[in-house]
Amino acid sequence: MESVPYIKVEPPGPIARSIIEKDQKFLMQSYVRWYPLVIKTGKGAVVEDVDGNKYIDMNAGLAVMALGHNHPNVVEAIKKQAEKLQHYSLTDFYYEEAVTAAEKLLSISPIKDGRVFYTNSGAESIEGALKISRYYYEGKRQYIMAFLGAFHGRTMGSLSLTASKSHYREHYSPLIPGVIHIPYPYPYRCPFKAEEPKECGEAVLGFIEDWIFQKLVEPSEVSSIFFEPIQGEGGYIVPPDNFIPGLRRIADKNGILLVDDEVQSGTARTGKWYAIEHWGVVPDMIAMAKAVGGGLPLGAIVGKSEVMNPMKKGSHANTFGGNPIALAAMKAVIETIESENILARATKLGEMVMKYFNELKEELEIIGDVRGKGLMIGVELVRDKKTKEPAVKEIGRILNKSFKRGVLVIGAGVSSIRIAPPLVIEEDLLAKAIEIIGEILKEENKEIKK
Ligand SMILES: Cc1ncc(COP(=O)(O)O)c(C=O)c1O
């Protein structure tokens, strides 16, 4: 067997090119596509393209494949369930798989005495949470707060909360009314120009209480605050430690629901089941998707029962949410994370990656900031450490070079590298991947100095 990465033909090879040509002919082209990778198979943290090139996967299929590709436990669970029952609408009837899976999901939730609602995607989990929070206040609290830099999805409701790139929203206005966007405490580029992370967190919390609630809306008219405990698409931004506890305090003081978007940061990615646990805060609802379904389209909302129980028959439902095969995969994912001690593994491997890039940061002008928790790590690239000018052109080149050398990694925010490999990645493979990225950063570092 070849060692990985293994580049047999420079990608995109001939088969990849012919598929891309057909893709352009038959599919709507609104997808992003970072580079011309045409994937064929995967095993663990290694994926193979249609031309036989083998890559180290630092994307995990966009933070979905926490247990790597084709984990035998997940494959087995899917096969077994497919032979038993594939679908029977949970909206209209009952089945046991939904109950046992919900019990399992609740057993790992920081929300005690919770209830589950199943969805099919991250955006749908956010849509549901939006409706539940409005319903909870019987439509009387019409304002919702969210953060600049947030990504909560692309359907009309979730897009109303998303504010990570203005072109995502272009041509879609009017979105749902009553959404107020607050700057997110981004310690490296604090919107309030605070030097220290703690000051940045205080500035944002103060802005909500002293400006938004004093000048714009009465807090009694706000139903919910949606936030990502670590901003994902916005740049893998870890907020200051006082931020999330501060949000909880503001929410409690004013009877506002705190909705934690763990679509990307949840299901063990950060070394905890949910990233919010790093700050010891319990939200009122958790929206999840991505990794929870082990690669099948599944999402969920876990909410406090007092928040979820008022929902009357028909007030929210769907046909496919809680599909039995997806739930079998979810159960296998959770049980495997437990049995293989994946939380500790994500923490340990994350420390190794952080150490490597922090050391490289000392050496290279191009690395402005390294941040993360577990295996959700952002490496922010700049053209100049003093001015913090984002290395916008360079990052595209870096990701493309990395692809050609057999390491799959993408960006986040304006100019950050997003490190999110499967949590089961072998230590030596991970070390190899970050070294390849490091080599490319060294090359690009010479370019910015020219
Ligand atoms: C934090 C967060 N919320 C919501 C979503 C939307 O999820 P989906 O693409 O499954 O609709 C994403 C997707 O990247 C996300 O990262």
Image (cartoon, rainbow, N blue to C red):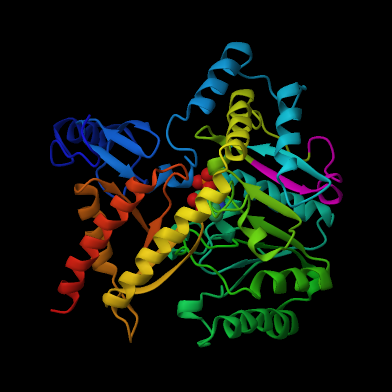
Is 180 contained in the magenta span? no
Residue 369, image x, y percentages: 40, 73
Does the image show residue 91? yes
Does the image show residue 413? no
Specify whether 287 is left or right of 133: left
Looking at this view, name the residue that lies furthest to the top: 83
Task: Indicate whether 76 appears above or below 401.
Answer: above
Task: Indicate whether 188 appears above or below 27.
Answer: below
Residue 279, image x, y percentages: 67, 65
> In which quarter of the view is residue 390 placed?
bottom left
In-front residue for pair 3/379: 3
Q: Quadrant of the N terminus?
A: top left
Q: Residue at x 74, y 76 (%)?
A: 217
Q: Quadrant of the C terminus?
A: bottom left
Magenta residues, start to end: 300-314
In-front residue for pair 330/340: 340
Q: Residue at x 24, y 43 (%)?
A: 36
Q: Residue at x 33, y 46 (%)?
A: 429
Specify whether 322 is left or right of 200: right
In-front residue for pair 252/313: 252
Disc count in the image? 0
Residue 45, image x, y percentages: 38, 40
Specify whether 116 is left or right of 87: right
Task: Indicate whether 177 appears above or below 19.
Answer: below
Residue 127, image x, y percentages: 64, 48
